[in-house]
Image (tube, helix red, strand yellow):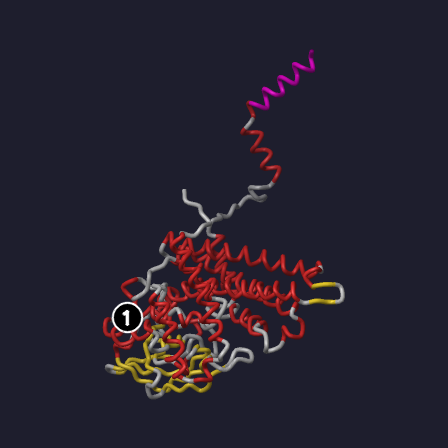
Amino acid sequence: MAWDFETEPEFQEKLDWIETFMKEEIEPLSNLGMAAYGPKAREKLIRPLQQRVKDQGLWACHLGPELGGQGFGQVMLGLMNEKLGRNSLAPTIFGCQAPDTGNAEIIAHYGTEAQKDQWLKPLLNGDIRSAYSMSEPSGGSDPLTFRTSAVLEGDEWVINGEKWFSTNAKWSTILIVYAVTDPDAKDPYRRMSMFIVPTKTPGVNILRSVGVGADDGSEGYVQYENVRVPKDALLGPRGEAFVIGQTRLGGGRVHHAMRTVGACAHALDLMCQRAVSRQTRHGHISDYQMVQEQIADSWIQLAQFRLMVLHTAWLIDKYKDYNKVRKEIAAIKVAMPKVYHDIASKALHIHGALGVSNEMPFMRMVTGSYVMGIADGPTEVHKVTVAKQILRDYAPTNDLFPSYHIPKLKEAAREKYADYLAELAADKATVAAE
């Protein structure tokens, strides 16, 4: 039996290096607002940091050695991502930024050799960016409502339709596109296929980039107008987009949760720092029981969520099969937005007017918590998944009263212990007679 809450010393050294690297290099750099400085800033400032990560053997650790990663299991990735989740720039520095990581994984698993040669290596190296063009303005992320179509004409696929919230589309070199190829398939989940579409292909129109909250826009609203791609642009088997997508999204949901642990820990740190620093007429606000209650509740929520995420990661490492851990993955997806919202909101409130300003990160965090309740499937869908998985372990009974009806349990107990009860009754009668 193995049951341990300790980290191996060798890996702890790596985690300590990440901690120092985050504080001394990544966090200061993130405050510059890199987007304003253009591509040259990436080459001068980000590339050297990425090389230092590679030198430490910490680049793209979610991938196996055959793809240039370390093949870390999910528990190790969880411990890493707790630290990376404190800062939005960190995943890019460590080669594990979304949506590129998931896109690279599905190209690695389902792509042809030609697709891997053309797109996978530059994607893994961080030389290009990609977008995951799945959800649509008419039906969100429900694949059974998708209208974007791909029709095979000779040796080309012709794609038409619109996609919504294709993250990083404006910076992408390629788009991974869901499209209906077999509208009459008996199984509705076999009607869609997946394609690799270069963003500069004629007919790919990024109508606009939508912002989340007050942030600059990075969520692409993309129109595909008679977009022609070669027959071999198909990614994976025809009609298998849903299966491929679930493989990708399962891991993505876990990694979102891992990074959210780090974001929540960061918010709690700032909350506590403010509590012991901010003075009122009667002392520091940390002396007030209502503030102490908020800090205690936040710490407890975070500790529970962290253990839940790490347990899910452990199960994935154990089974090597996301389908066997569907319930747990869905559960952390449900828990994630609430924990993030609750802790970020308390941190915001304790900072007062400063907390709601754009000089603090809390408004962005609160907005991010709502995003976590929508991205990769809404919370309600995942609650249904959890419930269905739980209910599979139960069988119905057709009796008038349930099997756990107390009179029925008492009767069963009397039958089970009838001999003993008879002896006890006889003993009692003997004592009474004496």
Q: Is residue 348 above or below residue 150?
A: above
Identified by mark 1, the residue type is: Gly
Whether residue 38 can be seen here: yes
From the image, give the main secondary structure of the stretch colored magenta.
helix
Q: Report the residue at 28% width, 80% height from top.
A: 152
Q: Going 63% across and 73% down the picture, which residue do you hit?
A: 355
User: Is 341 drawn above or below residue 172 in the view shown?
Assistant: above
Point out residue 375 in the picture as x, y percentages from the top left corner: 48, 70
User: What's the magenta region?
Assistant: 420-434
Quadrant containing the N terminus in the rendered view: top left
288 or 388: nearer the eye?
288
With 334 as the anchor, is 7 left or right in this view? left
Q: For the view shown, which residue lies furthest in the top direction?
A: 434
Is 59 within the magenta?
Answer: no
Q: Which residue has dot 1 on it?
A: 111
| Camera-side residue of 345 and 109 | 345
On screen, residue 365 above or below 422: below
Determine the residue positioned at 47% across, 84% down: 36
Secondary-structure class at tag 1: loop
Considering only vertical position in the picture, is 141 above or below 393? below
Residue in view at x 27 percent, y 72 percent: 116
Q: At which x and y percent is residue 235?
A: 30, 72
Where residue 279 sits, quadrant-wise, is bottom right
* Count of numbered badges drawn on the protein: 1
Residue 193 drawn at (x, y percent): 34, 73
Residue 188 visible, this angle: no
Q: Nearer the viewer, residue 127 or 429?
A: 127
Q: Check the image and name the residue furthest to the right.
A: 281
Q: The C terminus appears in which quarter of the rendering?
A: top right
Front-lying residue, 307 or 295: 295
